[in-house]
Image (spheres, grey):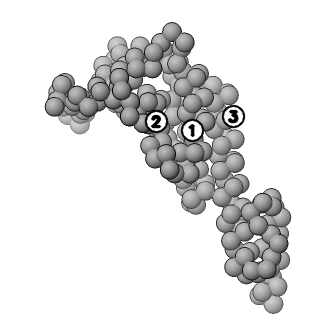
Amino acid sequence: MIIFKGKKKGMIHTMDIELSDIWAVFFPADFNQKYKYLGSVPWNPEGDIFKALEPLVIFMDYKAKPWWCPRWFLRLLHLFGNDNSIVRVRNWYLHNLFRNITKGYMITDYKTKWNDYDLRIHIIGDEQCYDLARGIENLYYNRGKREDLAEQIKAIDPNTKFDKGYPVEYLEKELNRLEDNYNE
């Protein structure tokens, strides 16, 4: 059931706001709906990316939400000011009010690139948020790289003592050594 009809002007389209959108503002069903006002929030609680990004989302919520402002109000401003989007603006007054209250904190994008373990996080926030995002990226990359190298070593030498618990540098040296011995 459409409550507010979207507008179409040229290439710009705003979304139709339905009763389910307003219901999600006041009664969020999951993590994504609860923190949607922060931008691109992970939606699948079973995934590895969700587990990696959850601390960042909660920390950015702590930094963005003033103590006097209820979270439902931020979700409402995000819905009517930004169409629940990080790029669209439905109402400039509500958009600017939302940005002023949240100090502009936002997760603009997260993705894996080149490999499943090469996580890229793009945020708008202060130095603490950037440090946490970089730390999560590095930890996610190191963990994935160690698992990948350990699998490659086990494929060449099943009786090896090297597993994913070793640092990346040791695993790379061992893999190079095994590949050199295998090629000879």
Q: Identify the element where label 3 is drawn.
A: helix
Q: Which residue is mark 2?
A: 31
Residue 169 can be seen, yes or no: yes
Eyeballing the image, is 34 above or below 81?
Answer: below
Residue 31 image offset from top left, x and y in percent: 46, 36
Residue 100: tell me if it is visible: no
10 Å crowding of disc 3: few (<14), some (14-19), many (20+):
few
Helix, strand or loop status at disc 1: helix
Instruction: For marks 3 and 1, give the CA distance.
Output: 15 Å
Quarter the N terminus occupies: top left
Please name the residue that numbered disc 1 is placed on.
54
| On screen, residue 169 above or below 109 | below
Q: Residue furthest bottom?
A: 184
> Which amino acid does the dot numbered 3 rest on?
Asp
* Residue that badge 3 annotates: 131
Above or below 174: residue 100: above
Whether tag 1 and tag 2 are in contact, CB under 8 A, the answer is yes
Q: Which circle's residue, 3 or 1, is located before the other in the chain?
A: 1
Badge 1 or badge 2: first in the primary sequence = 2
The kind of residue tagged 2 is Phe
| Percent coordinates x, y for residue 24 in the rendering | 33, 29
Relative to 73, is 168 on the left or the right?
A: right
Calculate the distance from the C-alpha at mark 2 to the C-alpha at mark 3.
23 Å
